[in-house]
Image: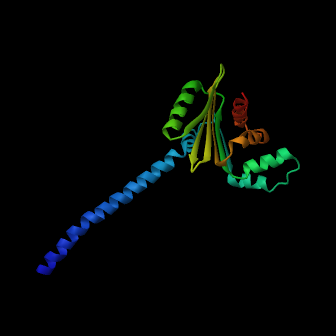
Amino acid sequence: MNYVISEINKCEILKPKKMKIKLLVIGLMLFSVTGITQGTIIEKYFEKYAEDESFTKVTVNSKMFSLFTELDANTASEEDFLEAVSKLKGLKILASDSIEDSAHMFEFTCNDIDNAGYEELMTVEDAHENMKFSIKEKNGRIEELIMVVGGNKNFVLLSLYGEIDLKNISKIARSMNINGLEHLNRMENAEKE
């Protein structure tokens, strides 16, 4: 009888510890899922508009960038481009030219980006459209550049990720003929002003 009581007491002591461990594991899982979710704003929009044919969706994976680095550079500008893309892991673009309230979508998306912990780098506003460039850094290195453009029924959401050197962004934009990427040249133009 004493043996049974002793075993029950041991179990009662262990239960709170097991419960704490379970709660800790669940908490860590929720924290990691939240961290992953915050880092993938573009994925949220890709999923949301996956079936919407008014949006063009472009994905360039790391394999494509690695294929670029295998090319031989014949000029200094080609060398610059190859150097710029060598550390990139991907590019995603979501674009449409038929958004009725593109200004509202622009503002909503910018709020999502701010709430996900991105740091605003630059905004450009003119009579035709608004642009916002934001970055996410880790250990002093830019790991993602995200751009939002909205105006005149146009909307573009672009995410460039990997190890990013801002000096090389415009080189990438000029060399890759992808709709929406040309807006990245605005960063270089703003730096010159």
Q: Residue at x 71, y 37 (%)?
A: 181
Q: Position of residue 100 (x, y in %)?
A: 59, 24
Q: Position of residue 88 (x, y in %)?
A: 68, 50
* 173 sits left or right of 52 in the view: right
Q: Residue at x 65, y 21 (%)?
A: 126
Quadrant housing residue 105:
top right
Q: Residue at x 56, y 40 (%)?
A: 45
Residue 150 lies, with reference to residue 165, above or below; the image says above
Quadrant housing residue 98:
top right
* 32 sits left or right of 182 in the view: left
Q: How is the image coloured?
A: rainbow
- In the image, 133 versus 150, the foreground residue is 133
Quadrant housing residue 16:
bottom left
| Quarter of the figure with the C terminus | top right
Q: Residue furthest top?
A: 127
Q: Position of residue 30 (x, y in %)?
A: 41, 52
- In the image, 138 versus 98, the foreground residue is 138
Q: Position of residue 118 (x, y in %)?
A: 54, 40
Residue 169 can be seen in this image = yes
Q: Residue furthest left?
A: 1
Residue 131 can be seen in this image = no
Q: Residue furthest right?
A: 74
Q: Residue at x 20, y 68 (%)?
A: 12
| Quarter of the figure with the N terminus | bottom left
